[in-house]
Image: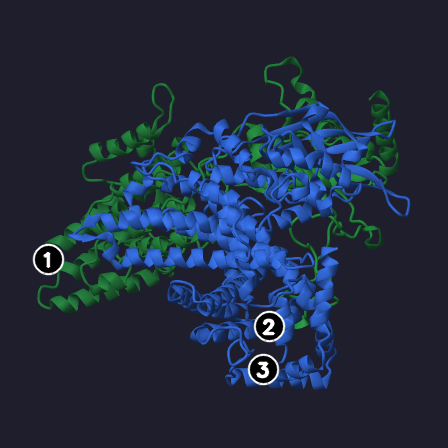
Amino acid sequence: MRQLRLREIRAFYHGHAASRPLDWNSTPGLSLSPKGVKILAASLRAAVGGCPTGKGMSWAQAILLARGLSRGWGGICSTALTGAPFSQVPPQAPRGLRCSAAAHNPDSSLVPRPPEPPRRPVKALAVHEELFRPALDGTRDKANFVRAVQNFAEYNVHKRGHVDFIYLALRKMREYGVERDLSVYNLLLDVFPKEVFRPRNIFHSIFLHYPRQQECGIAVLEQMENHGVMPNNETEFLLVQIFGRKSYPMLKLVRMKLWFTRFKNINPFPVPRDLPQDPVDLASLALRHMEPDLSARVTTYQMPLPKDSPDTMDPTETHIVGIQSPEQQSALARHDPARPIFVEGPFSLWLRDKCVYYHILRADLLPPEEREVEEIPEEWNLYYPMQLDLAYGRSSWDDYKFDIDEVEEGPVFAICVAGAHDQATLAKWIQGLQETNPALARIPVVFRLSGSSGELLASSSELEEPPPPPPPPEGQEEEEDSQQRQQQGQS
Amino acid sequence: MASSAARGRRAVIEAPGRQQQRQERLSGQHERLWAFLVLGGGALLPRPSGLHREPAPAAHQSAEPSFRQGPLPGQDPEVDSRKIDQEGRIPDETLEKLKSLGLFGTQVPEEYGGLGLSNTMYARLGEVIGLDASIAVTLAAHQAIGLKGIILAGSKEQKARYLPRLASGEHVAAFCLTEPASGSDAASIRTRATLSADKRHYILNGAKVWITNGGLANVFTVFAKTEVVDSDGSVKDKITAFIVERDFGGVTNGKPEDKMGIRGSNTCEVHFENTRVPVENVLGEVGGGFKVAMNILNSGRFSMGSTVAGMLKKLIEMTAEYACTRRQFGRSLSEFGLIQEKFALMAQKAYVMESMAYLTAAMLDAPGFPDCSIEAAMVKVFSSEGAWTCVSEALQVLGGAGYVRDYPHERLLRDSRILLIFEGTNEILRMYIALTGLQHAGRILTARVNELKRGNVTTIMETVGQRLRDSLGRTVDLGLTGKLGVVHPSLADGAHKLEENVYYFGRSVETLLLRFGKTIVEEQLVLKRVANVLINLYGMAAVLSRASRSIRLGLRDHDHEVLLASIFCSEAYHQNLFTLSQLDKHSPENLDELLKKVSQQILEKRAYICTHPLDRTS
């Protein structure tokens, strides 16, 4: 029993050997020296092993001592016990015995994003970094990643520094495109030594046993959660082997299993996991996503010019994809040509991490006095009467409708997604619409384009610059009018 | 004219004499509800002498033996239904024979060379013709709808010109109403007739689909839009009916449709391209085509009851033959309860639809050209659904043998499926039955409903008192039984059930009208139930009447009829009770809201929504 304890402590000690220098270097402000830790370790060892007479007493003492010491470190432990997130390379916090220290920062995620470069060169990590050297042909795929993990296990029989390796691997996953692969996560968890960190008694369970390892385990699960990877039975089995049933990673796993199933299909309008790269495909996906009518037809009015063509610079040669349902088509046909219709936008639509901007073709709501009352024609149905000749309607106590104040909006006739948000591009869309909506040729179209199209426009370099501020609408309308007249004259 | 006559009769019922007033005070609204039940039909209930009152003419007696239910092994029939089904056409010899029997002009008046049969006799003939569905449909398309327009709305000259040759079968008629875009929606008819410059012809253009006899016919009744100047001077598109001969030119037809059943009948598209129709060939008035179409459709339906009953009788014979000879476990099939049950069902359905059909036919034959379109629709709905259930059950008795083509059951099953669809689908006819009935009831109840809505204390107290008495359990007696009653005492039980149903149905209808008013048009599920109850009530009335007549006349096996009548009354009674309870407000039996929700969600996605049972989230 005692042997085991000692070995555990030693293993733990070794496990952190690699990263220790970093800690010392990075925490100059704290009055903690290598010597202090040695004293702590010695006293612990004494408490654990050096008290042959009263065994139970000594265990309690040891734990209390450890608690006291850790408190003496300025409440470093407490953040870890509450399971608060911590950053991987805390510049100011030391890694103490069985306690991890973290600046309590709710915004920081468990694993920093890969593009974020480490704030200072980390020598210790470089030890494992070379495992993730790009292969000869420079490809980074699952096979390479798996090989790196296997190499670690192979060359490092004692699994020295496995916690750091796992953190490193977690950060590298995105680069290798395996961040959604359950088997890779299971492989990572498999790096942990088995049976070592399991709590042996109730006190181990009460006090965070091997906190750094447990946090590392939680970090793996957290990254799975962020990428929507559902743990499977193998994950559970591994965690039981590594940390035991009564541990924080297991708690996390149980919670994930409970909530993932409930949240997985919570979105009634699911977006596919892998969005199409082609802008035309993405646009039609976005349009389908917005349009509830399944009979609606997506039309590509203009394909983007291939990248290598000489006039790529011409902004009007971008893609224009529109959608229109048969009902919208007939509504447009019925529209009173005396009333103008408007092209409005751009409005933003987010599909996962991509933003699409769309424009709508809409009209103002008719004033109540001009609305046509739908009347039932006399000779309509050959088989049964369409209305009853009765003087009374539905009684008020049989009216189940809630009293809702609804803001009525004018009809939307079509939606389009275009690569550019200027008037020239959108005029092409309107021209394309005229082929299927002949009535559109007689209706004046007013472009009401807003200058800013959304919050991310400035930051994203891919998007075109915002469209020029629209000229006063009257003049534009006239211009459009004359354009339409010309077209009419031609046709 | 028809409707005005009907209205006149209703007026008599609505304005009862003193004696009737007294009765009404005694029995509440029964008079009105009776009027509602037998809407428009002046004949209230049993009219024992109304059934089968004419002697059978020679024509159908000679026709009967010539039809055999074809391909039972060992029979050599003159009309081989199986061959007709397989080849997809009726042999010319058979058609010639039908023509020589005068079956192409059964309802054409004798002065125009037809047989001039009454409706009752026409129904009787239908029983024989119904043995082969393809022939029945061909004949029905010819005379029940094809040339019916000329009889109903044609002028003397038109009748004289067309009817003789149609009656002899020299010419075949077809009815062209349905279009690709227009089923029962008359407003979307695209076929157009424009008056030529000399105002002597209409130029007809358009396409009609699913025209029975479209390939055989020489004379078409075509419905097309024409421009009509209204009384206020505005020009409107209205429907006009035309008699179009194939010889007018520009009439072409597509190839026959490949159908599931009634394969021997000819169904195809008919196209009209600049067909010149003389103005004399306008059927009825210009712009009056809608009414013509409605009258033709409404008049053609009642005969389906007897046609199906004729087929079912034959079916019961054939199936019973099989059930009594096939042995399993040392017993014949007929000894098993589950098989016996099916025969009882078939007999009951056949009996009810026969009774309904002949009651309706008798009412139509009553003097004064009564409007029995609701009754006819009820007969059509009941008999078509009965046919489908019974053929399916009969096929079940045969088991695997029924599924192969050695027995006629599979053909009958395919043939009978069309009955639920043509001549107005059953859904549409249910709407017709319920709405026309409610319209009538609504007119009568308007004053009362208005008083209730205005909060007239006396009326409200009266209503509350009535409801209270109802809930305490009242016995309803409308006088069907008893000393002067028309129902025989041995059927008293069924009669009481009918009376009770009628009474509470009246209550429900009143409540429904009070609740929904004219918006009830949109409550299709409610209307369906109203129609179902009405059909059951009409069926009950018909069987009680017929069985009573049989007992009183001392017909053979009338005890069997009493059994069937009692069974049906009992079944229908319980069905009605359940349906009526569904019509109550906040009824736990009524799942309409849930059903609507489910279907909305499905139709929004246009797919079955539930995930696969093997799907998991983890």
Secondary structure beneath dot 3 equals helix
Q: Are marks 2 and 1 in contact (CB under 8 Å)?
A: no
| Secondary element type, mark 2 | helix
Identify the mark at residue B582; answer none if there is no mark: none
Residue B372: horizontal and vertical position, in percent? Answer: 63, 57
Chain coloured blue here: B
Give the alpha-carbon distance from disc 1 to disc 3, as whole Å.
87 Å
Q: How many marks?
A: 3
Q: Quadrant of the N terminus of chain A?
A: bottom left
Query: Are the numbered discs 1 and 3 placed on the same chain, yes or no?
Result: no
The percent coordinates of residue B81 (x first, y second) are: 42, 35
Give the number of the mark in front: 3 or 2: 2
Determine which quarter of the picture holds residue A475: top right
| Disc number for residue B506 | 2
Q: Is residue A213 visible?
A: yes
- Tag 1, which chain? A
Determine the chain carrying the residue at label 2. B
Q: Earlier in the sequence, mark 3 or mark 2?
A: 3
Q: Disc number at residue B467?
A: 3
Q: Amino acid at mark 1?
A: Met
Q: Nearer the viewer, residue A325 or B195?
A: B195
Position of residue B524 relative to residue B201, above or below, is: below
Q: Position of residue A221 (x, y in %)?
A: 35, 48
| Marks 3/2: CA–CA distance | 12 Å
Which one is nearer the viewer's eye here, A134 or A6?
A134
> At label 3, which amino acid type do we have?
Arg
Q: Looking at the rendered structure, which numbered label has been put on residue A1?
A: 1
Q: Determine the residue located farthest toward the right in the rendered image.
A: B233
C-alpha span from label 2 to label 1: 90 Å
Residue A235: percent from left, percent from top: 27, 46
Q: Is residue A486 left or right of residue A429?
A: right
- Colour seen for chain A: green
